[in-house]
Structure formats: C-alpha cells, structure tokens
Image (spheres, coloured by chain):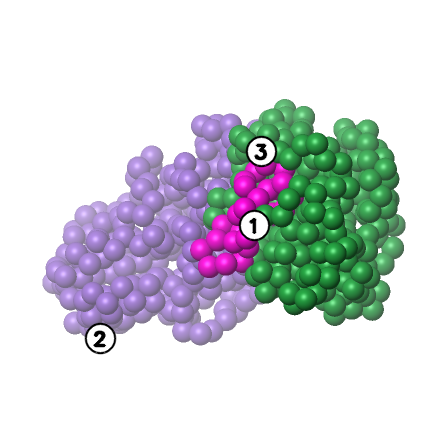
Amino acid sequence: MAEFINSGNKDTRSGFGAGLLQAGRLNSKVVAMAADVTGSVKMDAFASEFPDRFFQCGIAEANMVSMAAGMAIGGYVPFIGAFANFATARILDQIRQSVCYSGTNVKIAGSHAGITLGEDGATHQTMEDVGIMRMLPGMTVVCPCDYNQTVAATIAVSRWNGPVYLRFGRPSVPNFTEEGAEFRIGKAQKLLEGKDITILTYGHLVWESIQAAKVLEEKGVSVDLLNIHTIKPLDVEAIKASVARTGKVIVAEEHLIAGGLSEAVAGLLARTNPVPMRFVAVDDKFGQSGKPAELMSRYGLDAEHILSAAGQLL
Amino acid sequence: MTTGYTLQQTASQVRRDIIRMVTAAASGHPGGSLSSTDFLTYLFFKQMNVTPETWKRSGEGLDMFFLSAGHLTPVLYSVLARRGYFPASELSSFRRFGSRLQGHPSVEWGVEGINQSAGSLGQGLSVALGAALAKKLSGDDRSVYVLVGDGESEEGQIWEAAMVASHHKADNLVAMTDWNHQQIDGSIENVGGMTDLKSRWEAFGWKVIEADGHDFTDIEKAFNEASAAKGAGKPIMILFRTEMGHGVDFMAGTHKWHGKNPSQEQCDAAMKQLEETIGDF
C-alpha cells in the first residue's frame, strides 16, 4: 500500500489563507471580502499585503455576497470569507440570484465547516452546506483534504471561471498530500488502487479513510480510495470505473447524508450500477459542543466507523 | 436611439409600451413601472453616458444601471428598447415562453442592457455597490446608478448595503428610490412603516436629494446635484416623489395595480390618455 506521511498537523483554513495570498500575487484582479472574521478565516495576510483589494464588510453577509457579484461584473475575482454556515445557508437566496442565476464569478470560502468547528456548537457548525450549494445550478463545490491541498485548491479556484463554493475547516489535521501538487477541479484524486471495496470521501475524512484502509489491507482487503475533493461537478467516470471493479461502496463525509456526497453517489449509481453502499455520514441531526476529535467519533465520522461499514459490506 | 422627441414624448411612448406589454402578457407590474417612467427616461436619455450599440456587461468606461426592484421590467425593457439596446418590436414577446424578456430581468438570456438578474428584492443595491467599488479600484471615473423601490427598502439587505456603501465612501454610486408610497398589501405607511426615508438614509451617512419624480425640470436638477456630489465621500440617494400608476387615471395613486394587468377595454381607455409619439411596437 502507498505510504502517506503526515508532515505535521495544520489547519486547512490556513491553507486557504496561504493560497489566497498566492492567488492575489498571481492575479491582480483577485479581491477579498470578509464579514468581521478576517483572522478566523485567514484572510489577514491577503488584507495586509493588498489593503486596496480587501473589503471589510462587517457582519452583513447578504450584502457581502451580492456586492461580490457586482465586483465580478466589473471584472474582478472576488473571494468572500465567513464561517461556512453564514457563507451558505444564511445567504442562500443571495447566492442563488446574485451569483448563480446571474453567472457571476464569485468564490465563496466557507471556513469552520463541519462538526469539527467544535466547542461553539450547532449554531456555528454546518453539515448541510455541501448539499445546499450542490443544489444550485451552475455552482461548483470543492472541499480539499489537508493544508497543502487547500493551498492548491484555492489557487485553482481563483483560475476557475464561474461560481465556486470552497469548503474547509478549523482544526489542525494531518498534512500529507504533496506540496505544490496540481489540483484539478472536477477530477477525483486516486489515493489507493484496490479491487475489493471503494471508499469515496473528501475533507477531514480522507485521512481517516487512509487509516481504515491500512487496517483493511492487513486483513487482506484492498481498498480503492478516491478523494472526491470536487463534489460538484462529480467525477462520474472515476466513480463508475472504481465501482465496476469493486462492486461495493462506502461514502465517508463530514456532512449529513441528505444532500451530501452520499446522496450524489447513490443517485449516480442508482441510475448506472446499483451496488451495496454504506454511508459514514450524519443522519438528520444537528451537532453539539465538544472537542473536534471527540465529536467526529461520537457522530460516527472516523476510521473506526469506516471499518465497521466495511465489515457490513464484505 | 430614438431621437427628435422631447422627454415628455418619449415618456408617453414608454407608458404606452408598459400598458400594452402587460395587457398582451396578461400579467406584469404596471403600477411601479408608471411611477418610475419619467426619471428613468431622463436617466437613459440625458444623464448616463452609455453606448447601447456596443453594450457589454462589465460596463467598463461607461455609466451603469442596475434594477434592484426587478419586477419593474415593463419600464426597463421599454426604456432600453427605445434607447436602442434592442429593437422595440421585441417588446411584444414580454413574459412569453422562450422570450429573452423574462418576467424579471435575467442575464441568462443575454438581453443587452441587463447587467444582473433581479426579482428577489433587496439585492440590487449591494450588486451596484460592488460594481461602483470595482470602478474605483480600476480607476474608472464613471458612475453606477441603481433603482430601489420604497417597499423594497423594508428588506434588511438594503440597510446592510447602506451601511457598507457609506463605510467604503462609494461616492460614485447614485441610488434612486421610486417613492410612490405603495406596495402590494397597501400603503407603505400601513404595511412596513418605512416612512421618512430622508432621515433614515441621512442617518446611514448618505447624501440625500429629494425631487418631484414627474417633473423633468426637478428631475434634471436632482441629477445635476447628484453629479456635483460625486467624489465628495458619500454615496448618493435621490428620493423621487412619485405616484404609483402615474399617467393612467384609473391606475394612479393606488397599490391595486402593483402586479395586475388591465383588460383589453382598460388598455384601450389608457391609450386614450397617453399620446402615441415614437410609434407603438
């Protein structure tokens, strides 16, 4: 099995901050806006290097995203930053009309996504955002798995033409993908080649899936592991090819089953190749306060739960 | 562009277009379209520096207009057509299946002069603010105009935009309120209570100008004052005092024609009150 080395835990939001700064250096049309959480969403380095291209918008997310649409019309590439729930659900209609229906080139950066936001509790956690954003016509949804990949994804998003929701998180997690590796939006990243079972995952659960795959490997089960960092548009061919080989699928995501990759994959395979599936995701629940790792475990979102799902399928 | 007509004559034709469009479509929003006809006619025919023949969405180097109160498509489409953005004959397709002239403006259909989709209220002021800040950032000294409804001003996002616009000194942004005092359920005073718009906008740090929205001399004065205030550090709001349904006696001064089409007989009656000048589509 391929080796994945953790070069040291880092938060993906810092990857966004580093990526945004690089994107700003590469393209003078990149601008950024924050809703009073500049430091939390790691836009501060961009703001200090490009003060003219950074717009503090106050705690007024609805205005911020529509304003970003106006800047996009004027030829700029605006990134708006807020906690994921406030960057999506709170301003859904603004994203729908000002961004998607208007085809404006706005990049929505949702930080602190998922349950790993932790102690602040359910009001600030979101496990619905991917589903909400996926449903909008014209929206691209990206969620990288670690620091290095978030840097690369942010730069790729800045070059992508059209609305994008870029999802990342708060906690420090293993950083194991190659620094500077190319990030291709819409193209699944094959992490492990296997023949017995397919695991489709993204975000913080990629590392957990690798840990689960190691255990399965020791038991003689080979895992085909795909990092579906682009949830929309889905890399249909990669998923179909993998499932055609293995005939069994686990989808693991820090999100509700409803609207997430789980339902996206189920919808695809129901039409093309129905096979036994298990979802390592949250079923119709809000989160609660707690430490990130503790919450991931209590809500069934870790290597242990991936293994038990595999046990049911094998 | 239609030339050789006075503003009054142009506005009269626009009002005919509005009534004929909503009658033919058997739906649409005549009331607010009629109240904003005069100052929009002035804006497109006298005030803005635009080139309809070579229109592009980015508005680079030109003045730009955004419609925030998206239901006012009858007046917008008519003014755009009469100004030369697209042929007036297309107005007959308003609200029909497959038409570019959707019930609410849509960029998806590539209509010349439409910079942004609108319909869900409260968003257009923010979009215009973004476009205005983009102009400042790229050193483009043209202005951005946006039309907001007085009923629409009950939306919270309007006041988010009001705050952020003055905070960022968007003094190339000229908003206009069609202050007709009516909304779907009745008068503004009875429904949302959004009265005394002048003090509210001033409190948010805007330069506020008031004018009679049906008097071209007063409209001109207001736009001149707005132009003079450009660059002075404050976003600008022109409150146009108007009458809903203005120009058609049975539609005037009531909320009842906000989103209702006249019958053919009512349309015929309205036509008798509005002179055909440029020529019906």
Question: Is residue B80 highlighted in magenta?
Answer: yes
Q: Which residue is mark 1?
A: B91
- Mark 2 lies on a secondary structure that is helix
Magenta region:
B77-102
Q: Residue at x 33, y 35 (%)?
A: A180
Disc 2 to disc 1, C-alpha distance = 63 Å
In the displayed structure, A195 sits above or below A32; it is below
Disc 3 to disc 1, C-alpha distance = 17 Å
Q: Which residue is mark 2?
A: A312
Asked if marks 2 and 3 touch (Cβ < 8 Å), the reply is no
Q: How many marks?
A: 3
Question: Is residue B17 highlighted in magenta?
Answer: no
Question: Which labelled disc corresponds to residue B230?
Answer: none
Badges 2 and 3, same chain: no
In the displayed structure, A251 sits above or below A158; it is below
Identify the chain drawn in purple: A
Q: Residue at x 33, y 63 (%)?
A: A264
Q: Which residue is mark 3?
A: B52
Asked whether A9 or B199 is in front, the reply is B199
- Nearer the camera: disc 2 or disc 3: 3
- Nearer the camera: disc 3 or disc 1: 1
